[in-house]
């Protein structure tokens, strides 16, 4: 089982930037497609970015051009660089496997997430 720890969130003004990190322990992480998800109050969790083991990336339309996902397989870590942040980006951000690639596999246990608040 992979354990996930997200970090890097905080309070930022609109237009600002943050870099989130997702550190994983356990085997298999570096061979797995990973997604960054977010959940805003009263809303369902949504996938905002994904990256394959080989580094191919994809993004939700709402963050395309502003967010960049990357990974360092040697460090078992995936990052989310968030630029030009908007108030609607406010949410708790989580990482987990990208189930679009693994329909028969359950999510790993969710980490605690990291809070991102965009407000002036």
Image (cartoon, rainbow, N blue to C red):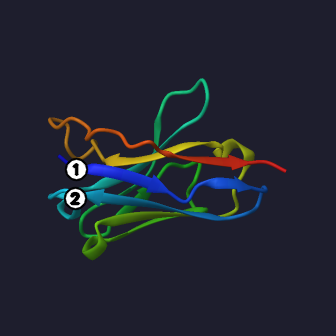
Few, some or many C-alpha atoms within 10 Å of disc 2 (few <14, some 14-19, many ≥20)?
many
Whether the residues at callouts 1 and 2 have beta carbons within 8 Å, the answer is yes
Q: What residue is pinned by disc 2?
A: 29
Q: Could you say where residue 102 lies in the image, as x and y percent from the top left?
A: 19, 43
Q: Quadrant of residue 71?
A: bottom left
Badge nearest the viewer, 1 or 2: 1
Query: How many numbered badges does the structure rendering display?
Result: 2
Q: Could you say where residue 46 lies in the image, as x and y percent from the top left?
A: 47, 38
Q: Is residue 87 above or below residue 66?
A: above
Residue 21 seen by the camera: yes
Few, some or many C-alpha atoms within 10 Å of disc 1 (few <14, some 14-19, many ≥20)?
some
Q: Could you say where residue 73 lies in the image, as x and y percent from the top left?
A: 27, 71
Q: CA distance from mark 1 to mark 2?
A: 7 Å
* Left or right of 101 in this view: 112: right
Q: Residue at x 41, y 57 (%)?
A: 58
* Left or right of 49 in this view: 9: right
Callout 2: SS = helix
* Sequence-wise first label, 1 or 2: 1
Residue found at the very far top of the displayed protein: 42
Q: Quadrant of residue 40?
A: top right
The residue lying toward the viewer, choosing from 1 and 91, is 1
* Left or right of 104 in this view: 80: right
* Left or right of 96 in this view: 63: right
Q: Residue at x 69, y 47 (%)?
A: 117
Q: What residue is pinned by disc 1?
A: 2
Q: Could you say where residue 63 lies in the image, as x and y percent from the top left?
A: 58, 53
Q: Is residue 57 above or below residue 92?
A: below
The residue lying toward the viewer, choosing from 93 and 69, is 93
Callout 1: SS = loop
Residue 82 seen by the camera: no
Q: Residue at x 55, y 57 (%)?
A: 64
Q: Residue at x 39, y 53 (%)?
A: 5
């Amino acid at each position: 089982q992979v354990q996930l720890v997200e970090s890097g969130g905080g309070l930022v003004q609109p237009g600002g930037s943050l870099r989130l990190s997702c550190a994983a322990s356990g085997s298999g992480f570096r061979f797995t497609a990973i997604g960054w998800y977010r959940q805003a109050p009263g809303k369902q969790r949504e996938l905002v970015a994904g990256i394959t083991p080989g580094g191919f990336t994809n993004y939700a339309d709402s963050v395309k051009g502003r967010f960049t996902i990357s990974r360092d397989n040697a460090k078992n870590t995936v990052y989310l660089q968030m630029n030009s942040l908007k108030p609607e980006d406010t949410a708790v951000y989580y990482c987990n496997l990208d189930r679009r690639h693994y329909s028969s596999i359950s999510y790993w246990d969710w980490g605690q997430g990291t809070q991102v608040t965009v407000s002036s």
